[in-house]
Image (spheres, coloured by chain):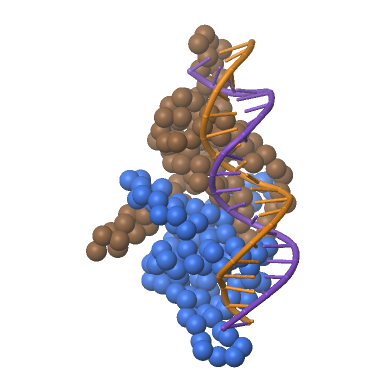
Chain colours: A brown, B blue, C orange, D purple
Amino acid sequence: MENEKKMPQCPVEMTLQLIGDKWKVLIIRDLMEGTKRFNELMRSVTGISQKVLTSHLRAMEKAGLVNRKVFAEVPPRVEYSLTETGLSLKPILDSMVAWGMHYKETLES
Amino acid sequence: MENEKKMPQCPVEMTLQLIGDKWKVLIIRDLMEGTKRFNELMRSVTGISQKVLTSHLRAMEKAGLVNRKVFAEVPPRVEYSLTETGLSLKPILDSMVAWGMHYKETLES
DNA sequence: CCGAATCCAAATAGATACTG
DNA sequence: CAGTATCTATTTGGATTCGG
C-alpha cells in the first residue's frame, strides 16, 4: 500500500498502481459526490474496515488524489475530498458504470 | 477467483467483480490487440506466473469475457481472444490509458 | 505447449482494544 | 470522531513438479 514502486512504462499499469484496487475505486466513487467525513465513508463504502479505509486514504492522499482536511474541533472532524487529479478519474468511473450496467443487462437476457 | 459472489447493485462493483484485479486488466489490455496463444500472454503480461494466468483466463472465460480455442495438434495450441463483451471493455481501458498518461505528465511537471 | 496439482510465501484485510 | 496498534485470518501469488 505505502510502497514506492518504480514508474511503469504502460499507462494502464500506471493507473492500476494508483487505483488498481477494489477499495480505492469504491472510495473514489463515493468521493465523486463531494466532500465526506471519515465515518460517512465508512458507511458508504460497504464492508470496509476502519484500518483499511485509513490506509487507503493515506495512500491516495500521498498520490495526490485526495485532500484531507482536519478541523481542530471537539469532537474531531476530518473531511476528505478529491483533488483535481482525483476528479479527473471521472471518465474511468463513468465507463465502469456504463459497462457494469450493460453487463448486467446481458446477464438478464 | 472462482467464487460465485452475489450480483452487486452498484454497476461499479459489478465491473470490479469481473475485472477489479490488476492481472485481469493487463490480460485484457493485451488481448485487445487480438488473439494470442498462452505463451504469448505469458510473455506480454510481464511478471505473471503460469498458474495465475491460467486461473484468471478460466475465470474470465466463465464470465463470458474471453474465448478459449483449443487446437487438436501436437504440440498443443490454445488461442485466447476477447468475446464481444470483453471487447466492450475498451472504453474503460482507453480511459485508463488516457488518465495514466496525464498523471505521468503531472508528475514530471 | 499448455496446464493441473501441490505446497509454501507474501500481501492484504478483518477483529479487537485503546486513545487524543 | 477519527484514528493507531496488534494480532490473526484470508486471499493471492510464486515455485516446482508432473502429465496429455
**Residue B90 horizontal/vertical position (percent):** 45, 64
Tell whether A25 sits left or right of A61.
Answer: left
Question: Count the marks: how many?
Answer: 0
Tell whether A34 sits left or right of B51.
Answer: left
Residue at x 59%, y 46% (from the top left corner): A18
Q: Residue furthest left?
A: A109
Residue D7, image quadrant: top right
Tell whether C20 sits left or right of B80.
Answer: right
Does residue B96 sit above or below B88 in this rendering? Answer: above
Does residue B10 sit above or below A68 in this rendering? Answer: below
Residue D13, image quadrant: bottom right
**Residue B37 horizontal/vertical position (percent):** 57, 79
Q: Nearer the viewer, residue C5 or D6?
A: C5
Residue at x 51%, y 76% (from the top left corner): B80
**Residue A30 horizontal/vertical position (percent):** 43, 37
Q: Nearer the viewer, residue B107 or B34?
A: B34
Q: Nearer the viewer, residue D2 or D7?
A: D7
**Residue B81 horizontal/vertical position (percent):** 48, 75
Residue at x 56%, y 84% (from the top left corner): B77
Residue at x 49%, y 60% (from the top left corner): B93
One can see residue B29 in this view:
no
